[in-house]
Image (tube, grey):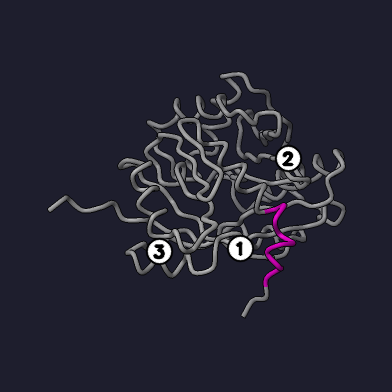
Amino acid sequence: MTQFADPAALEPQLANCRDYWLGWGVQERQEDHLSLFRSGLADGRLNGVMRLRDEGRAEEAVAEAVKRFDGLPFTWWVGPDSAPGVRRRLVDGGATQEGSMPIMTVRTDQVRHAKGPSALRVRPIGDSAEELSDWVGAYSPSFGLAPELHADLVRVERERTDAGRITRFAGRLDGRTVGTALLYVAHGVAGIYVVTTDASRRRQGIGAVLTQAAVQAARENGLRVATLQATGDGAPVYRRLGFSVVGEYELFEVPAPGPAQ
């Protein structure tokens, strides 16, 4: 059985993750007993519950969340910062586990060198509509986001109220953006998000180079710890860079209520 770090020691990393995703809550966000965000976009990853602090309020909280999302798909994250027993209560209530994501971390001065195509150029991008549109267009296919969401995704990226914490990176090759990464600075740690590579350019080290660039930028700004949540495909890449698993999020789909009798 994997031994994870003490949740108290992980709190800066967990808080960074919560804040990043709460930043998607351009329609609504809440951070008290129930932490949730609502982008309003019809994709379950872009609306969600990040934490429930009180297990005793689980039944009430599920009903509240279903009401607040009002038919929008959403994901319930259960991690080390969730109250004990929340997972069991969700499952008992009919929630389905969609997957899990290891929480990984590395000291910014210990990340290993990554090698990608010699012609790859990585740079931070600005927040103009044109640059954001190109960047969103590069990451959307990797996440399976519907093309019809493109304009709204660009709008949400521009409307985030935490823009001062964000640095977006684009990797360009042969005149086009082939990879993305995002650095999110909060709670004294560097959160790494939106690491993607164009399907035609995978297994060339592009995602690793972009991750390294984000971690290096964090180190240059005095941050000592970088953290991310990995997909199954990404975890081996991050291990090779020196990241280690310190915890896990489980992701659940909560069923909508049936018709009233």
Q: Indicate the quadrant where residue 58 lies.
A: bottom left
Q: Earlier in the sequence, mark 3 or mark 1?
A: 1
- Residue at 69% across, 58% down: 238
The foreground one among 185 and 49 is: 49
Q: Nearer the viewer, residue 162 or 99?
A: 162
According to the image, label 1 marks what residue? 80
- Residue at horizontal 57 percent and vertical 36 percent from the top: 23
Magenta region, main secondary structure: helix
Q: Which numbered dot is residue 90? A: 3
99 part of magenta stretch: no
Please give the label number shown on residue 185. Answer: 2
Q: Is residue 119 left or right of residue 224?
A: left
The residue range painted magenta reads: 4-13
Disc 2 versus disc 1: distance between alpha carbons?
A: 20 Å
Viewed as shown, does residue 230 lie left or right of 220? left
Name the one closer to the observer, 130 or 190. 190
Question: Which residue is found at the position 72% from the left and 38% from the top?
Answer: 120
Q: Nearer the viewer, mark 2 or mark 3?
A: 3
Q: Does residue 12 belong to the magenta stretch?
A: yes
Three-letter residue code for mark 2: Val
